[in-house]
Amino acid sequence: MKVIVLPGWTAKNKKWKDEVCGFLNAKGLEAIGIDWKHWGLGSDQMDFGYELNRLANLVSQNPNCSIVAKSIGTVLIAATLNDRKLQVHKLVLCGVPIKTSDQEGKKYLGELTKVNSSKIKIFQNYQDPYGSVTDLKSFFQGSSLKDNIMEMNRGDHEYPYFDEILAFLK
């Protein structure tokens, strides 16, 4: 199974992306990681439109792939699925940045409620500074997606839950 891995905003998330890809590849999956364009430019400004188009092309070239996304990657895949009406096999979201997302980002994240909830698993640290489990459950209140949020026992924005990710993808 092909899995596309989308990291968080800053270049320090490259390590997480590489670790997820390495783990999944070692377990027999075919993981492809994305490096955001702004990392190579030494910039902290993401070209959202560029990355949205690049992601849409990658997903459309890999039908029925699964996605593992962290932080801004969760917003990008939500936007891609909404805007392009693309389908994925399974969707793993880690550290959804609900506190720091602007209105447009929250609109895209809200569109995830239209995806079959059995295809989505959300790993959220109970005190993630970008959005706690409580924040996220409140955001998805009234949606079956609320039940797919796994409360993880960390108070940061790190997501080393590779075994849990693999278990859901299989």
Image (cartoon, rainbow, N blue to C red):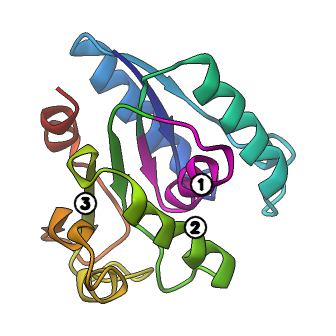
Nearest to viewer (mark 1 / mark 3) = 1
Give amino acid for label 2.
Tyr
Q: How many labels, in total?
A: 3
Q: Secondary structure at mark 1?
A: helix
Residue behind mark 2:
108
Residue behind mark 1:
82
Which one is earlier in the sequence, the residue at label 1 or at label 3? 1
| Magenta region, main secondary structure | helix
Magenta residues, start to end: 68-87
Compared to residue 29, the image places residue 128 above or below, namely below
Residue behind mark 3:
123
Question: Residue at left 59%, top 54%?
Answer: 82
Q: Is residue 97 left or right of residue 40?
A: left
Q: Do the residues under discs 1 and 3 have CB atoms within 8 angstroms?
A: no
Give amino acid for label 3.
Phe
Q: Do the residues under discs 1 and 2 have CB atoms within 8 angstroms?
A: yes
